[in-house]
Amino acid sequence: MNRREFFKKTLGASTLLAFGCAAPNFLLRSAAAASPSRRRETILVVIQLSGGNDGLNTVIPYENDIYHRRRPTLRITPDKVLKLGNGLGLHPDMQGFQRLYDEGHLAIVQGVGYPHNNRNHDGAMRDWHTAKPKDPTATTGWIGQALDFYTEKNFSTPGGVFVGHIEPPFALQSKKAIVPKVQTAGDWAPVYHGKTADTFAGLLEASSQNESQDEFLDEIRQVTIQTLRASKRIESIAGLSAPDAAVYPQYRLAQTLRTIAQLIRAELGVRIFFAELGGGGIGGFDTHAGQAANHGALLRELSESVTSFAHDLEKDKLLECVLLMTFSEFGRTLTENGRHGTNHGSAAPLFLVGGALKKRLMGVHPRLDDLEEDAPKPHTDFRRVYATALENWLGIESRLVLGESFAPLEGLLGSV
Amino acid sequence: MQSASSLLRPLAAPSKRPLTMNKNSMSEPDGAWAPFKPDSQRPWTLPLAGHLYRRAGFGARWDELENAMTSGPQAAVDGLLNPAADVASFDRLFDSYSPADSESKDTGQVLAWWLRRMLETPHPLRERMTLFWHDYFGISNIEVENARDMQHYIRTLRRHALGKFPELLSAVASEPAMLICLHAKASRKSKPALQFPETLLKQYTIGAGHFTETDLREAARAFAGRYVLQHEVKIIAEEQDTGIKQFLGRQGPFGSAEVLDILARHPATAEKIVTRLYRWFISEADTPKPELLRPLVEDFARDFDIARLVGIILRSNCFFSQVAYRRRIKSPVEFALGILRPLNATVATLPLGNALAELGQELFQPPIATGWPCGRHWLNTFTMAKRIQLAQRLLNGGAPFNTALDWNKVMRQTRSADGASHLLDLWLQNDISTASRQAVSRLKTTGGKVSRPNLADTAAFIASLPEFQCS
């Protein structure tokens, strides 16, 4: 059985073969290990936009009169939007995203949400985190559950890492997997500092050579050696700060993504990274008042940070192994309120960034003449996006994580 | 029995494997749980004494090892179950603490006190068992969001940690923290809370397969009328369901007390607890056969006396055999306390609590209703890096832990030629691989361009050895 046949047999689909990167499936580790050419595994990066991002001023239906009428002060005029065609334009602060879109590395999934979003921050965010809106007692997050599958196959590698300054969101809550939280690569490595670092590391590695017929102890020795080597790799990569310092802007999210890029390069076996934007500042994306400046600044931070990240990875041909997705707990109302802001809504667009995207636009812009409590209605369940990431990218049967079957978005990730 | 003076010899040569399985005594379950009586075939050794204090405490201090070697295993277990020290006055001191802000969600201070208690307690086995029950019941502050309720809950666990299980269960089932965590803050007659009885039956007592949907509904009825009001569980009489219930083959106007008692004394409950204790005290490396556990289960089901059960386990041939020796991985708490307590070191325990969370064990926040996954899950390339770093930071002093540690005093305890040898004896009873031993001795002789590592660095190195990660 060759590699292709093996995948076909195991996955029942050939969706993953289009990628240049490895078996996106930890269930197939043995196959990947057996493969002579060392290939990289697929990696998912999730960015949470905290507060409820105003989708209507992010991906803008600038040709729609209703939009302009209902947003007398907040509307972005056609001359300002960054036009994508089809009557859609990006917020003027998202030049980076426009560039990624033109390069084919950015996709927009429109009208994403779920029925009966209660438009309450905590409740809605919890739903996005658990992926089980009907079960308020769910005790794990969707990523945490995916990581639990991962850890059963590979104890020694943390399958997921939270990179950021806030408390790790509930999406990462797992039953078994320990999910590290780091702010910089330096939070992970090196294990030894200073002049004697190499001596200690060398001696600890020497102490960890398998000696007895003791499998229990040998596993601990093995993870000790892996730890020292991982630490070494992180150290050597994070130490190369000079070349890429210029590439990343000073935004916090950019620095977070720089850390993620370093950890990706260090080949630690981490499959899912989680980052956040908006939770640290005042209000974040929850733009009830004076929206224009705040929202623009956040979108600029998102766009420039992610664009630097994508271009950084592209240099080393790593972008094709990475899929980045954004999400927010809800969109916002169409009508601006009396304080130059918008209120909690429902549907919103998600962004996907990566080197393996086969489409740039998924779904139509939600209708503005058919609203639900003043907000666009979702037509694409957010769990279909999760299913796409799990099934078509990470190679995890999404039903096991989501509790029910959701159809992955067709054609987005090169399924043939 | 090895004498104390022979123990004090510097242990230069690698000891032979410290124990061998006596096939005859271990093949029969009764033999496995019979008290370990050292003989020439299976002598009482320093590694076995260290093993006892790692499992029943947080690692032995040097005087504890010395005393244990003189007194033998049975007396050492006696001392762990019933310490001679003044536990009552220690408790009074530590129980007087209450969080400054009783409505605070932040359990940091409460945890800092608990860690200090573990570090200094004259009754380490009781803290280990408090930790066991914290793991067993898995109540999390993520749901409770109140430091005072969590503190009260842990105190209840401690009070009954080595008591009778029915009393423990009854007390815990009336903890505000448990009812809040399991969404049973208000259980009305017309709509009794379901998650609490379900978790009680499934996870804490008899387990799936031993009850029907009807049993569950009837149990829920029996718990109706219980409300959490102002940090207390109150009974609202008019919301109680006083009707007849059919529960696990019995019938009566059962209330919460009767249902809890039936569950606590059920044979399946005894089996569940014994199985969990086997993992806690004996081994994470194997799944014990039911025949092996049967004598313990039957014995425990007689009176549900936790201390007696724990005593049998700790005294047993099985406990002092290859089946148990280094067949667990230290949890982060065991790892950090296992460094500090044997050295009589004190540290700032507030940052220690945060460090343990980084290592994967955030006390007061077990991930699920059955606690932490434990075992092999503790160690990955991140948490292992964090262990190695934590050992260095704890032992070198300075912020944030500000460790107070008197190396001179540590060294005065021993006749060992050097600090490294003594630490190997103290922490690992000198039972390490040839490769580890060579590495430690090369560390001692490292010189030249690289300055010779100080004792703290050497100590941190020893605490990073694969052998040290084992309990």
Image (cartoon, grey):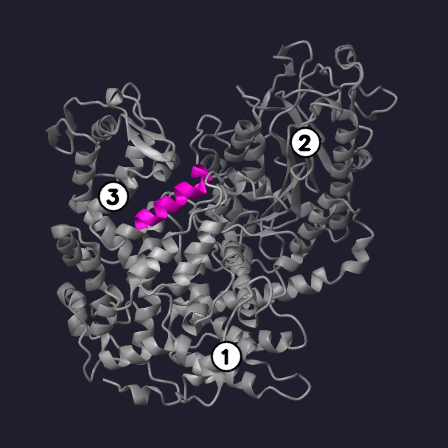
Q: x and y percent of residue A104 in the render?
A: 76, 36
For the residues beneath circles 3 and 2, the answer to whether they share a chain is: no
Q: Secondary structure at mark 3?
A: helix
Q: Which residue type does callout 2 highlight? A: Gly
Query: Which of the 4 image quadrants contains residue B204?
Result: top left
User: Looking at the image, do the residues carrying marks 3 and 2 touch, with CB atoms under 8 Å apart?
Assistant: no
Q: x and y percent of residue A198 in the render?
A: 63, 75
Chain name for mark 1: B
Residue at image point 20% right, 68% down: B316
User: Looking at the image, do the residues carrying marks 1 and 2 touch, with CB atoms under 8 Å apart?
Assistant: no
* A206 is higher (above) or lower (below) than A126: below
Magenta highlight on residue B154: yes
Q: Secondary structure at mark 2?
A: loop
Task: Report the span colored magenta.
Answer: B140-157
Residue at image point 41% right, 72% down: B342
Query: Which of the 4 image quadrants contains residue A93?
Result: top right
Q: x and y percent of residue B385 in the render?
A: 55, 63
Residue behind mark 2? A283
- The disc placed on residue B169 is 3
B251 or A261: nearer the viewer? B251
